[in-house]
Amino acid sequence: MSSVAGHTFNWITSNTSVLVLLATLAASLSLNVGLGWRVQALTATRRALRPGGIRVGTTLTSIPVLDRRGQRGTISFRGQPQTVLYVMSPLCAWCEKDYDNIRVLAAERGSGFRFVGLSTTADKLDQYLLVRPLPFEVYVAGSRGLPNLDLSATPQTVVVRPDGVVDEAWVGALSAERRDEAERFFGLKLPGIRDHKDSPPH
């Protein structure tokens, strides 16, 4: 065996544990990166499969609405602070179960986000808000709808950036997976729905 080969063999022999550790770290890094991409892909797939609702990436410049006195107006997003648009209905049982979540979310994050409520109907809205008041203004969706505004599912918790692009959207009451995602996004703990059961959107 040559001198160089001998030194190389001796180095490898004496540093076997180091080489094994480096190989293990490389494999672990590769696995973690792969899992990270897999989680992102699964999250994107789940979002794409969710029925109805406003989609992430949608651009909302403004929404035609009525105030609770019936006066026409608009909810504007461009140039506004980051907005949490809460789509609800006083006739929706899951909105009632989601009440504690949106109330806590608005109370805890109201200084960093603008909260706006959008009801799909004016029917019984005043009575609903008397019993379950919300710490932000609630408007009624106007008849002049937008083609990219899907209000078929309630409740919806939608985060709109100042440029009008939807950054996040959760369709259905914030329980189970939706609750976990919202907690990570807003950095707080939510109470969850009252009966602690997962909720399909209505």
Image: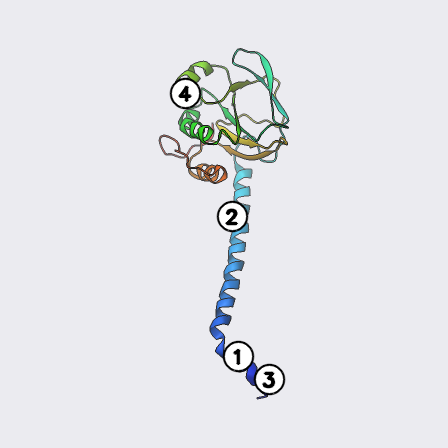
Q: What kind of element bears circle 3?
A: helix
The crowd level at tag 1 (other Cα within 10 Å; few <14, some 14-19, many 20+) is few
Q: Amino acid at mark 4?
A: Arg
Label 1 vs label 2, nearer the camera: 1
Q: Nearer the viewer, residue 129 or 113?
A: 113
Label 2 vs label 4, nearer the camera: 4
Q: In the picture provided, is 139 more to the left or to the right than 129?
A: right
Give coordinates of residue 34: x percent, y percent: 54, 55
The disc at residue 132 is: 4
The disc at residue 4 is: 3
The crowd level at tag 4 (other Cα within 10 Å; few <14, some 14-19, many 20+) is some
Q: Amino acid at mark 1?
A: Trp
Kindly give the residue lying farthest to the front in the view shown: 111
Q: In the picture provided, is 64 more to the left or to the right than 17?
A: right
Distance, label 1 to label 2, CA atoms, is 41 Å
The crowd level at tag 3 (other Cα within 10 Å; few <14, some 14-19, many 20+) is few
Asked if the residue under mark 4 is in contact with the one under mark 2, i.e. CB atoms within 8 Å, the reply is: no
The disc at residue 11 is: 1
The disc at residue 39 is: 2
Query: Between disc 1 and disc 4, whose residue precedes?
Result: 1
For image coordinates 55% across by 42% down, the residue present is: 44
Give coordinates of residue 65: x percent, y percent: 58, 18
Distance, label 1 to label 3, CA atoms, is 10 Å
